[in-house]
Image: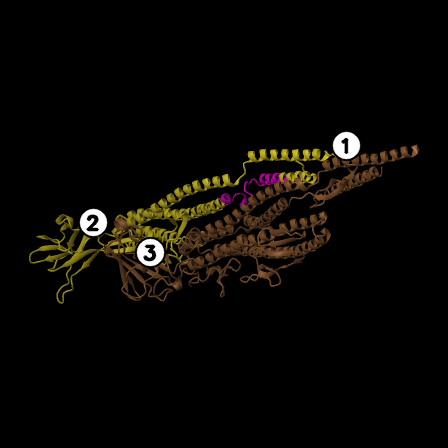
Amino acid sequence: MTDLLNLGTTALSATQTALSTTSHNISNINTEGYSRQRAEFATHPANFEGGFYVGSGVNISTVERMFDNFLAVQVRVYTSQEAQLDTFNQFARQLDDLLSTPELSVSKGMEDFFNAVHEVANDPTSIPARQVMLSQAEIFTSRLNTLDQQLESFKDQVNSGLDVIVKDINVMSKSISNLNQAIIDASGGGAVPPNDLLDQRDQILNELSALVSVDTTVQDDGSINVFIGNGQALVVGNTQLDLSLIPNPTDPLQQDIGYGASQINVTKQITGGQIGGLLSVRSDVILSAQTELDNMAAGVASVFNEQHQKGITLSGSLGGEFFTVPTIGTVDAGNIRVALTDARDIAVGLPVSIQNNVANAGTGQIEIKSVDGTTPFSGVPPTYPSTNLSFSFDGTNYTITDNLTTETASFAYDPSSQSGLTVDLASLVWSGGTPPDLTVTISGVPQVTDTFALQSVDLTGIAVGDNRNALAMADIQTSKTLDPNGTGSNTHSFGDVLGVLVANVATRTHQSEAGQKTQQGLLDQTKLRYETVSGVNLDEEAANLIKFQQAYQAAAQIIKTANTIFDTLLRVV
Amino acid sequence: MRISTSHIFNQNLTSMLNQQAELSRTQQQLSTGKRILNPSDDPAGSVEILNLQREFNLMEQNLANADKAENKLVIEEGVLESSTNILQRVRELAIQGLNDTNSLSERSAIAQEMNQLNEQLLGLANTRDSSGNYIFSGFKNDVQPYASISAAYDGDSGQRNMQVGVGVLVETNDPGNEVFEAQHIQTRVADNNAPPAVGPVSSSQINITATAQQGPIDFPITLTYDSVAGELTITDAAVPANTATVNPYIAGQSIELNQLDVDFPDLTVQLDGTLADGDSYTIDTQVTPAQTLFRTINDFATALSTNSVGSNDSPNNGEFLTNISTAMETIVGARAELGARMNGIDQQRQVNEGISFNMEKTISSIQDLDYAEAISRLTQQSTGLQAAQQSFARVQNLSLFNFL
C-alpha cells in the first residue's frame, strides 16, 4: 500500500514537472531564441519482491532542450551572409538613387555644358552665350563636387557604422564569455544542461552572426569558443578579446578593424555580417566610384584645358586654364573648379588663320584642321611679320616657307585624287628650325603659282567672330579622349566613363539585391527547419496539457485507490 | 511535420510585407510612368538610356544649330538677292546712260541715281545680324567690312562653321571680298609716240570704234606706222609674236584686228589725224583680280557724269557692262552656294530628325512602362495581398486552446 502511495506520488510529481515544462513552453511562445523543452519520463527502478520485479513508478530523467546544433550553425551562416548583402545593398542603393536623381545628374550637367559650348560656337561674340557656358561649367563642376561630397559622407557613414558594430560585437562577446562561465557553473561539469542559459547564449550568437561571420566550437564543459576572420579568437571560455577601430594606413579618414590589445589590422580577414557588408561596399562601390569620378574629373580638366589653351581669347591672349589645376596634387571630383571668371577669357578663336591670295586662279583651299601645340609656329603669339608661313603650289608640290626663320618644307599634292588631304606640318622634313605644330587640310584644285598665307592673328584687330576653337572644344564631348582601362589608346569619351560608373554601381546594387533575396530565402528555409525542431507549437502544447492533466488525474486516482484500500483494511481490523 | 506557431505568424507577416513592397513598387511605376525607377532595376538598360539620351541631346543641339545656321544663311541670301536687284538696276541704268543720245544733264541724273544705288549696295555689304555683328567681314565680325565706297575690305577670310550633324559642319558666312569683289578689266590705249626733240608733234590718234571682245585681251597689241612704206604693222606680245600688216594704210581707215589674225583681239580700230613715221600705239587690258563693286560703279558713275563714256574714251568705260556681269556672276555663284548649303542643312535635319525620333522611341521602349501590363500586375498583386490578409486572419483563429 505504501508502495501504491509512493508510486502514485512519483506519477503526480512527474506529471507536474511535465505540466510545468509544457506551461514553460507556452509562456515562452514569444521569447526570441527560446527552444522548446520536453520532460523525459523514465520508469523508476523496479523492486524485487517475492521473486518478481514490481514496478515502482515514474520519474523525470531530464528536461530536454529540443535543439539541433547543425541547424543552429546553418542559421548563423545564412544570417551572416544575408546581413552582409543587406547592408551592402542599403548603401549601394543610396548611391544608385543618387546617380539617378536628375538634379544631381553629372551626365546631364555635362550635356548642358557642351550645349552651351555649341551656343558659343554659334555666336562667338555673344557675351551672354559665353556667360552661360561659364555658369553651365560651374553647374557641371559643382555636381561633380556634390557627388564627391556624398561619397565622402558615405565613407563617414561607413566609419560610424563600423564604430557602432565594433562596440556591439565587444558587448556581445563579453556576454558570451560571461554566459560560458555561468553555464560551466550551472551544468556541474556538463551533467545537467542549463537549458535557458544555453538559449540565451545561442540567441546572442545569432545576433553576433548578424554583425560578423563567426565560427564556434563547443567544449566538453559546455562553454563555447567563438572565432572571427580566419581564426582570430573572440571568446575562449570565459575570456574575451576586444575589436577596435584603427585608421587605415594609406587613408587616415578610413577606419579599419583592429584585433586584440595590440590592434592588429584584421580588416581584410573579416567577412560576413553587417561589418562585412560595410567593408565590401566601401571597397567595391564607394571607393571605386570615387576613383572613377576622380579620373573622369581629371580627364575633363586636362583634355578641355589642353584644347582651351590652344585658343585665343577676346582680348587676344592665348587661352588659360579653363578648369583650375591645383598647384599641389591633381584634379579630382572634389576639387575641380572653373578657373575663368571673365566670359571674355574663354578662348573661342584660334591664334592662326589662313588667307587665300586674292589673285589665286584655282579653287584650292587650305584650312587649319587642328592646332597641335600652344605655339603652333615661330612667332605665335604674334610677333609678326604678319605672314608667318606661306604656301605656294607649283603643279605637283606645295612648298611651305616659314617667313620668320626662312626654313622650308614641301609635300606632294595631286588635286585629282588627294582633295581633302590632311597634312601634319610637324611630320614634314624641314630644312631646319622647329617644325610648325599644325595640321592642315588641303582641298580643291589649285592653279600653278597660287599662294596661301598662314598667319598668326593680329593682336590689334582680333577676329572676334572666329569660332574654330569653340567647335574643337564642343567636339571633345563625343571624342574618345580617356583611357580608363589603361589599354594604351583612348577608348572612352567622358560620357562613356560616366556610363561605366553608373553601370558599375547599378550592377553591384542589382547583384546585392538578388543575392540578398537568395540568402533571405535560404535563411527562411533553414529557420523553418530549425523552428521545426526548436519552436513551440501551441496546438501541440495544448494537447500535451490535456495529456498531462489526464495523467495527473489518473495518478490522483492511484492515491485515492490506495486510500480506499487502506480504509477497507482498517474497517476489517 | 511540426511547425512552430510563431513561425507561422512570422511567415505570414513577412509574406504580407513583401507583397506590400511589390505593390508599392508597381504603384510607383504607375505614378511615374517609368519601368526603370533606379539604374539597378535594369543596369544594362539604364546605361543604354544614358548613352541614348546623350546622343539624343546632341541631335537636338544639332537641330537647334541647324535652325540658327539656316537663319544666318537666310539673312545672307536676302542681302544677296537685294544686291542682285540693285546690280540689275545699275546695269539697266548703264545701258541707258551709254546711249549716245543722252545729253550731259541726262547722264548726270543717271549717274546720281547710280551713286544712290551704290550707297545702298554698300549698306547691304555692311549688313549686321541681330547681335550687331557684320555678316560679311569674316571672323572680324566687329569690323565694318567696307568703311566707304572707296575703301578696301577690312575683314578677313574666316568662314564660321556650325555643327549641324555628327561631323557635319556648314559654313554660315561668306567674307565680303568673295562676294562684293570681282575681276575688273579695262582696255587701255598707250600712246608710244615720244614727243620729237624738234619739229611738230604728231597729230595722230587711235580710236577704238567697235569692240566685240569678251574679257581681257590676252596679249598687249602694238600698232606701228611706217610712212616710207605707208604700212601699218600690228604685233602682239605673244611668244612667238603674231604679226600682220595693212598696206597701204590711209588715216581714218578702219581695221578689224580679228580679221587680220584670229589670235588678235576682237576690236575695230582706226588711226585718225596726220600719221607720222614711227607712230605707235599699244592696246592692252588692265586686269584687277578683285575690285570692289562700289569702286567699279563709282568710277563709271563719275565718268558718266562727265560725259566721258564714249568708245573713244580711255579708259574705256564701255567695259563696265562686262565688269558688272562678272560681279553679278560672283554674287549669283555665292547665292547658289548658299542654296546648296541650305539644302545640305535640310537634308541633315531630316537625317537628324529621323535619328532622334528613333532614339526617342528606343528610349521610351526601354524606360517607359507598359501600362496594360503594370495595371494587370497591380490587380494581381492587390488580390494576392488581400488573400494573404484574409488567410492570415483565418489561420490565426485556429488554435486548440479555443476548444479547451
| Horizontal side of residue B286 vs A340, given as left or right | left
Q: What element carries label 3?
A: strand
Query: Image quadrant for the C terminus of chain A?
Result: top right
Task: Please identify which colour was used for chain B in the image.
Answer: yellow
Q: How far apart are marks 3 and 1 (CA)?
A: 99 Å
In the depicted view, which residue is nearer to us: A34 or A255? A34
Which label number is shown at residue A561?
none
Q: Distance between the residues labelled 2 and 1?
A: 133 Å
Q: Distance between the residues labelled 3 and 2?
A: 46 Å
In the depicted view, which residue is nearer to us: B290 or A189? A189
Q: Which residue corresponds to mark 1?
A: B403
Q: Is mark 2 on a helix, strand or loop?
A: strand
Q: Is mark 1 on a helix, strand or loop?
A: helix
Mark toward the start of the polypeptide (2 vs 1): 2
Q: x, y (%) of residue A534? A: 68, 42
Query: What type is the residue that disc 3 sits on?
Result: Val
* Total number of numbered discs in the rendering: 3
Q: x, y (%) of residue B343? A: 37, 43
Q: Does the magenta stretch include residue A48?
A: no
Residue A127 visible in the picture: no
Q: Which residue corresponds to mark 2?
A: B211
State yes or no: discs 2 and 1 in contact (Cβ < 8 Å): no
Q: Give the range drawn in magenta.
A: B20-46
**Magenta residues, dominant SS class:** helix
Query: What type is the residue that disc 2 sits on?
Result: Thr
Q: x, y (%) of residue B352? A: 43, 43
**Alpha-carbon neighbours of circle 3 within 10 Å: few (<14), some, or many (≥20)?**
some
Q: Which residue corresponds to mark 3?
A: A440
Query: Image quadrant for the N terminus of chain A?
Result: top right
Relative height, residue B293 to residue A19 (above, below): below
